[in-house]
Amino acid sequence: MSTIKRWTKVAVLFFAGAVLFGSSVASAHRGGGWHRGKRMKGKRGCARMLMRAPSWMLKKKLKLNDGQITQLKIIRGNIVKSVIPTRAKIKLLRFEIRQLMDNPQVDEQKVLALSSKIHALRGQMKTLRIKTKLKIRKLLTAEQKSNLRKLCRRRMMRRFRRFGRQ
């Protein structure tokens, strides 16, 4: 076999290995904190699962009774109804800030006042979320709370292993 053919085979095998290795590394670190194009903020754990998971899944996994399911649905509905107007206000205030910042002469006092309003509204939403979590915890029995902790640990371990770490 000639040296040119040998070096050609070596080069082809090297590039094929590099492509395979690069694609496996890229897929192992796929998420990396990004979810559907948005940066994930903070921890997304059990409380989020209680707010977003379908009631049939919670009934099955946590063994909730029908009364707890109806109470959970009421609590979920109330928080959604109260958060929608607050989010709309925040969007409007952010739009106003953008308009003020586009002007050549920026009025700092107005921008800072709008910014403090936004932070106050976010604080209200955070307080509302915490109160909702506390209401939901009051609904659960001690056994259900322990099942919830176990379920969350399993979900976190699955999420941890998914990105190639063990």
Image (cartoon, rainbow, N blue to C red):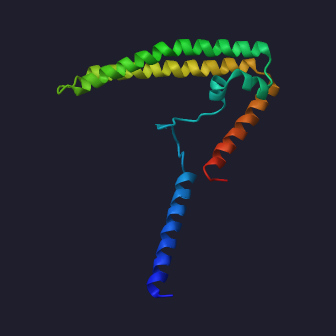
Q: Residue 14 at x, y = what percent?
A: 50, 72
Q: Identify the residue shown where x is 69% and y is 19%.
A: 136
Residue at 75% x, 15% y is: 68
> In the image, is 26 to the left or to the right of 58?
left
Which residue is located at x 54 percent, y 35 percent?
42
Give the percent coordinates (x, y) of residue 49.
Answer: 65, 28
Note whether 9 is above or below 83 in the view shown: below
Give the residue at the far bottom of this rendering.
Answer: 2
Q: Residue 119: image x %, image y %?
A: 42, 23
Q: Nearer the viewer, residue 27 or 87?
A: 27
Residue at point 52%, 54% (across, down):
26
Q: State the image quarter where residue 47 is shown.
A: top right
Q: Nearer the viewer, residue 16 or 30?
A: 16
Q: Give the percent coordinates (x, y) of residue 85.
A: 47, 13
Q: Is residue 41 above or below residue 144?
A: below
For the residue pair 15 and 90, the one nearer the viewer reads as: 15
Residue 103 is left or right of residue 13, and the answer is left
Q: Is residue 28 above or below residue 104?
A: below
Q: Is residue 120 left or right of residue 43?
A: left
Q: Quadrant of residue 121?
A: top left
How many numbered discs? 0
Name the outermost residue toward the front.
1
